[in-house]
Structures are given as C-alpha cells and as structure tokens.
Amino acid sequence: MADFTIVLGTRIWSTWSMRPWMVLHRTGATFDETVIRLRSDGTTAAISEFSPSRLVPALIDRRGPEPLTVWDSLAICEYLAECYPEKQLWPRNPAARAIARSVSAEMHSGFHRMRKFLPMDLFAERPGEGLGEDGVAADVARIEAIFKACRSRFGAGGPYLFGAFTIADAMFAPVVSRFRSYAPPLSTVSAEYVATLTKDPGFLAWEAAARAEL
Ligand SMILES: N[C@@H](CCC(=O)N[C@@H](CS)C(=O)NCC(=O)O)C(=O)O
C-alpha cells in the first residue's frame, strides 16, 4: 500500500485539491488518490467518508501505527514540509520563508472576487470574461504585485517565486490557470511566471490526470 492517500475533488475545478497535490507530487512519496466528483448529489456524503471538514482535500498518512488524516490545503502543505525537510518545500532563508508563508496565507484566505468571477476550469479559454466584475481588477493587481515582489527580492536562484519551487508556487498554481483561461493583461514578470508554472512537472502531471478524468 502507498504511504499516503490524497482525497481530491474533480481536478478541472478543485483549486484547493491542486495545491497540496502538487506539493505531494514534489516530495516523490508514493501515494494513491481518491477523486470525488464535485457538484453532484452525493458529493458531501462521499467526502465525509474521508474528511472531517466535509471538504476536500484531505491527506491520509498510512506510515504510522494507525492512519493519520490531515485536512485543509495549507495544513496538508505544512505537514508535508515537516515530513520532508530535505525537499525544502519552504525557502531555507527565514525572511524568504516568512514572506512565502505570508503570500500563501493571503492566497488561502483572500481573493474572493477573483474566485467568484474567474472560477478555475482547467482547460477553459474565456479571454476577457469576468475581468470587469467588481473587485476582480484589484485582486489581479494585488496578485501581480505579489509576483513582482517575490521574484525581484527572492527569485534570483530560479524561475519560481522564491527561486526554486516552494509551497507558495503550489498555492498560486490555480491562479496561473485562471490567468491562462481569462487572459487579463499581464506585466512581463507575471507573464513569465505563468509560463514557468504552466511548464512545471507537477502542473503538467495534474493536467494530464485531469484530462484522463474528463
Ligand atoms: N479552506 C479549505 C477549502 C476547501 C474547499 O472549499 N473545498 C471544496 C472543493 S475545491 C469542497 O470540498 N467543496 C465541497 C463541495 O463541493 O461539496 C482548504 O483550503 O482546503
């Protein structure tokens, strides 16, 4: 049996599932998956079998004497960072790590207008749609400011927000998918970052699995 089971929602829509899945994929751990169809009559009941919050994602760690269930995307990412310190899933530098945690938490708790009006639909092409809705431009501008600040202050060592891939990149992966679908006008820094993340092995693996689900 694999070390972990990750419980996910329908891949094309489930932003919260995509984030910790990319992090788990990065660890190289063996894992299997349970994918629950969202937006169906039985969704809540099906999720409740695995997740106490009745929301996906959830991670089940089977390595100990009894299985341990961790839920909520950011808590799962933190748990994996603790399980695999050698993978440097957070930046090693304390200042970079503090900012990586700040932008990840900001993503986790904010950007409600963008979430509402630019929902993730992984392969959709809807250029311009939703961009004029109230508050969307402000959310996009704030995200662009985050990309610029992280890349310029901490990104010298590679093409990701903090140079090498970290949890912060996974947290922004669904945003990058939205930028690709809805095509807001972007700065060069943001456009380059979208190109980087959409070529990331974890992002591509998520897309391949999502295609197989269609
Ligand atoms: N704060 C949670 C949010 C999780 C969440 O909202 N998950 C959605 C899917 S992306 C869900 O489970 N929805 C249940 C449903 O559609 O019935 C996290 O970060 O994991």
Image (tube, rainbow, N blue to C red):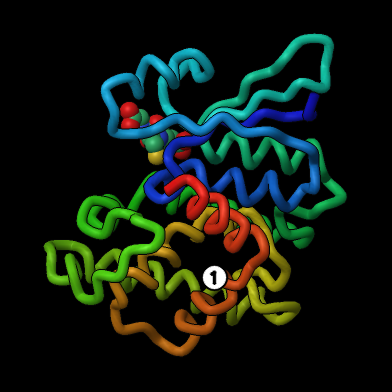
The residue that appears at 47% across and 45% down in the rendered structure is: 213
Nearer-the-camera pick, 99 or 130: 130
Residue positioned most to the bottom = 188
| Image quarter of the N terminus | top right
Q: Quadrant of ligand 1?
A: top left
| Residue 197, position as x, y percentages in the image | 57, 70
Q: Residue 140 falls in which quadrant of the image?
A: bottom left
Nearer-the-camera pick, 98 or 28: 28
Q: Viewed as shown, does residue 153 lie left or right of 10? A: right
* Three-letter code, disc 1: Thr
Q: Viewed as shown, does residue 51 lie left or right of 135? A: right
The residue that appears at 50% across and 60% down in the rendered structure is: 173
Write down the residue under mark 1: 198
Q: Above or below — where is 37 with respect to 51? A: below
Q: Above or below — where is 3 with respect to 105? A: above
| Residue 30, position as x, y percentages in the image | 79, 38
